[in-house]
Image (cartoon, helix red, strand yellow):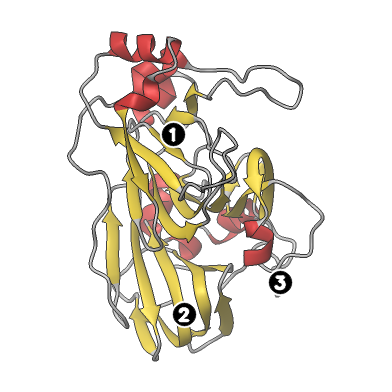
Amino acid sequence: MIKFEPLLKQTLWGGSKIAAFKHLDTNLENIGESWEISGVDGSVSVVAEGPLKGRSLSELMMQQKGLLVGQSNYERFGNEFPLLVKFIDATHDLSIQVHPDDEVARRHGYHHGKTEMWYCLGGSATTPPDGDMTGTVPPMLYCGLKKAITPQQYEQMVANHTITGALARYEVHDGDAFFIPAGRVHSIGAGCFVAEIQQTSDVTYRIYDFNRRDKDGNLRQLHTKEASESIDYTVLDDYRTNYGRGKNERRQIVACQQFTVAVYDLDRPMLLDYSELDSFVILMGLEGSATLDTGDEQTSLNAGETVLVAATAREITVRGQARFIEAYV
């Protein structure tokens, strides 16, 4: 079982929740993301402790191959680790954006598109954009189109700053989940704190950025044409991912070609059986603390910690009181 050093990303919209959540001693401000496990070029995770300390995830992939990620995954992805997992803290709204699917991404020179999902850890109310201090705004996000529009209407709405009027908007609560397949327009809003599981890809097409300027005073680049090529214009009644919630049992949230994600909320010991699974497993601590025991080794899983379990692990006994995410391919 492996823990990695978090890769902290400072952003225009980042806040202070991540450092507190992960109990980090850092002077960095405006931390928008903590990349917990990453194989993205230029941001590859490094082992934090134990006999493998200092080794990169890329090194582990080349050395351990299918023993680390599962034989079928290694045949499918080679030495590229297939998932990127993060914690995200938004003090301000992120841009309205979309990710391409694999086919569109490859046309533009990328290895993969990006399908992702969010598990919401609640958040905090924020001051309205107009500065009205008499009230606050609950954490919100955009996910999907709420009405049918054409590509031509999309471009017009971006140009006249009305694109948010075409998007479904949701108030965020602890435990809410949203699946964002490639092509679905979305944006994390101010006050949101989420865990994100996604394909290993950092390709994002920015649709609209509320006319904000970067640290140098320049309007941030939009990718209107590329986004138009990527958007899925299908309209759904509800974009929330509804799943059963309960104690001391596995609750599956998403199962797709790119990943499977479930959540556990335990207050008594539980055996996680991976004897039939040909994949690595990622466990992300959301609340409380627990001990993970494979029989050969033990490690902690506290809120804010993320553990990579090799595909050779057949079962894990979890003891403690903890809520955590399970993700694999």
State the quadrant of the N terminus: bottom right
Q: Which quadrant: the C terminus?
A: bottom left
How far across and down, in percent of the image, does residue 183 sit?
33, 30
Residue at 41% x, 62% y is 174
Residues at marks 2 and 1, CA–CA distance in whole angstroms: 34 Å
Q: Can residue 88 be seen at all in this image of the molecule?
A: yes
Could you tell me how far apart the alpha carbons at marks 1 and 3 are, in whole angstroms?
30 Å
Q: State if disc 1 and disc 2 touch (CB < 8 Å).
A: no
What number is the disc on residue 322? 2
Which badge, 3 or 2, comes first in the chain's sequence? 3
Of pointers 2 and 1, the one earlier in the residue sequence? 1
Which of pointers 1 and 3 lies earlier in the amino acid sequence?
A: 3
The residue indicated by pointer 1 is 112
Left or right? Give the position of 209 relative to 218.
left
Residue 16 falls in which quadrant of the image?
bottom right
C-alpha span from label 3 to label 2: 22 Å
Category of crowding for the residue at label 3, using alpha-carbon neighbours closer than 10 angstroms: few (below 14), some (14–19), many (at least 20): few
Q: Is residue 251 left or right of residue 327?
A: left
Q: Residue at x 34, y 75 (%)?
A: 274
Q: Find residue 45 and report its horizontal and vertical position in percent.
A: 64, 54
What residue type is disc 3 on?
Answer: Glu
Residue 237 - label: none
In the image, what residue type sits under mark 1?
His
Name above or below for residue 297 compared with residue 163: below
Numbered circle sitting on residue 49: 3
Of tags 3 and 2, the one toward the viewer is 2
Q: Residue furthest left?
A: 237
Of 216 and 261, which appears nearest the observer?
216
